[in-house]
Image (cartoon, grey):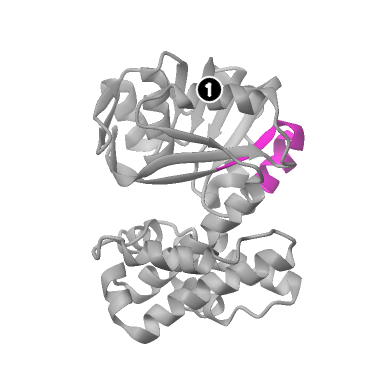
Amino acid sequence: MQFAIYGAGGVGGYLGARLADAGHDVTLIARGDHLAALQSEGLRVDSVAGDTSVDVPATDDPASVGPVDYVVFTVKAYDTHDAAADLDPLVGPETTVISFQNGVDNERWLAEEVGESHVAGGVAYIFSTIASPGVVEHTGGPARFVFGELDGSRTDRIETLYEALSGCDGVAAERADDVRVELWRKFAFICAQSGVTAAARLPIGRVRETQPTWEMYRRIIEEVVTVARAKEIELSTETVSEWLEFAEDLDPDMTSSLYYDLEHGNQLELDALNGAVVRHGEETGIDVPMNEAVHAILRPWADDRD
């Protein structure tokens, strides 16, 4: 099967390497120093689930690849619009574009560019990043990928993708009954984990130890759940308690990708996370003061890096 990994970073690079190891035809689409390293030295994955190295084609030009069976779309959310506009050479009549990104709006943005019939949604539960050009480091998380059709139907293309990912070492694949629920469920956690660790400039251990900050963490999850239900996304009544229990078990030094990007001078995914909660809250008439506070604190930093 032919896969194009559009955004071969922590998530995309990990999946691309595992798919290549399983015998699939994989092309990595990347840019900058990371692309140069992929082209000269190949991709190395240092993983708690087992290390691997693969030598597969890498490019920054989708037109040089042509139509594929699946585009695994894993760019940062702030690049979604621009990257989606470049997908046409990869998308044939039967191509599926599946997003494994942070946020709940990426699939809609993709559909505006390539057509809703080509788009499926997914959620990645994995802690991985580019450790250095050409090297992806997977430090934890179950490497679980949950995905499905946006309308909740079961289709051959989802079954085929499930079989492909299930055949990969170091990947736990799961078909979603309702991928919208999965997207918003993860969104509730990542808005709290990313927003609070970045705004406080502290890891989760310090957040848990500081009662008002831990309370903010809880309220961010609650706000996202309330907004989701207002949008008729039926999140479980246990969502808040489940994520708090999960966060209580995280390594005390754990932060988030938003924290990492803030500390390293990178562009921020704020608009796709807490900023998106604020927008959806306005649309549904739901007050989201904790998400507004995180958004306000981080807005100047995000503006400086756009």
- Residue 56, picture quadrant: top left
Identify the residue shown where x is 50% and y is 67%: 303
- Left or right placement of residue 58 versus residue 273 in this view: left
Decide if residue 297 is in sight here.
Answer: yes
Determine the residue positioned at 38% across, 69% down. Answer: 198
| Depicted 30 relative to depicted 282: above or below | above
User: Foreground residue, 111 or 149?
Assistant: 149
Task: Please give the range of residues in magenta.
Answer: 107-122
Of residues 175 and 58, the one nearer the viewer is: 175
Q: Amino acid at mark 1?
A: Glu
129 left or right of 65?
A: left
Residue at 54% in and 50% down? 77
Q: Main secondary structure of the magenta part?
A: helix
Residue 91: % across, % down: 66, 24
Answer with left or right where residue 217 lies relative to residue 108: left
Whether residue 87 is situated above or below residue 164 in the rendered picture: below
Q: Position of residue 135 (x, y in %)?
A: 27, 34
Q: Nearer the viewer, residue 76 or 96?
A: 96
Can you say whether 51 is above or below 183 in the image? above
Residue 85 % position (x, y): 65, 37
Residue 113 painted magenta: yes
Residue position for label 1? 163
Residue 138 at x, y percent in the picture: 30, 41
**Mark 1 falls on what kind of element?**
helix
Query: Is residue 14 shown in magenta?
Result: no
Q: Is residue 61 visible?
A: no
Q: How many marks?
A: 1
Of 192 and 168, the residue lying toward us:
168
